[in-house]
Amino acid sequence: MTTYGTMSFHLETERLLLRPWAESDAAEFCALLSERGKGTPAVEHIRTSIAELIAATATTGIALLPIQRRVEGDFIGYCGLIIGRSTLEEPEIAYELFQHAHGRGYATEAAGAVIGAAAATGRKRLWSTVGAWNAPSLRVLEKLGFERDHVSTEENGEVVWLTRSLL
């Protein structure tokens, strides 16, 4: 079995900081998840989710990280690596941003930093799975060099599976 380095949990780009979760992120994380249109999760539930994310990071060496704008200092979403529908050896990149932060290149910038961090662990490939309806997210992944692998059908519709070599 190949062992991989631990992903960096502090990433900086020109405009963004990606950092470990804090319990104080719970209210903002709730607000972000409520934009999905399925109601607002309870803050206590999200605090538990944050604790689970922190624990998973300690176990796996990969992380989903909050995104903050450097100048404004505000939480605008998250980006990072997850096992998701994939494996620890070839994790998925995942990101979600507040709607007010869409269309400004933040997802591309954050995901680019995460791809660099993933490559530094010694991994050879990343996956991403995106709803076929989500054209903006598919454009972000294309800009980052992801290529379509296949499409599956799940209960919420078609899911596009994409891969990106880290070599």
Image (cartoon, grey):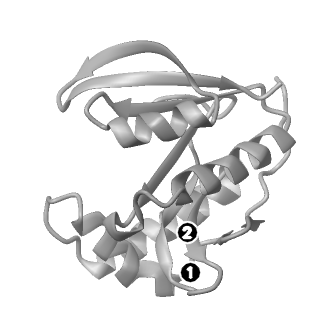
Q: Which quadrant of the view contains residue 8?
A: bottom right
Please identify, in this view, whether the residue under mark 2 or under mark 1 is nearer the observer.
2
Label 2 close to label 1 by CB (< 8 Å)? yes
Work out whether 133 lies above or below 7.
Answer: above
- Reading the image, the residue beneath label 1 is 22
Q: Position of residue 153 (x, y in %)?
A: 25, 18
| Residue that appears at 69% across and 59% down | 58
| Residue that appears at 84% across and 26% down | 2
Name the mark on residue 66. Answer: 2
Q: Position of residue 133 (x, y in %)?
A: 25, 33
Extreme residue in the front direction:
104
Q: Which quadrant of the view contains residue 147?
A: top right
Work out whether 114 lies above or below 3.
Answer: below
Q: Going by the image, does 148 lie left or right of 151?
A: right
Task: Kindly identify the amino acid type of the residue bearing the numbered disc 1.
Answer: Ala
| Residue that appears at 38% across and 42% down | 136
| Residue that appears at 36% across and 83% down | 27
Q: Nearer the viewer, residue 61 or 27?
A: 27
Quadrant of image for the N terminus: top right
**Circle 1 Cα neighbour tier, 10 Å, few/some/many (<14 / 14–19 / ≥20):** few
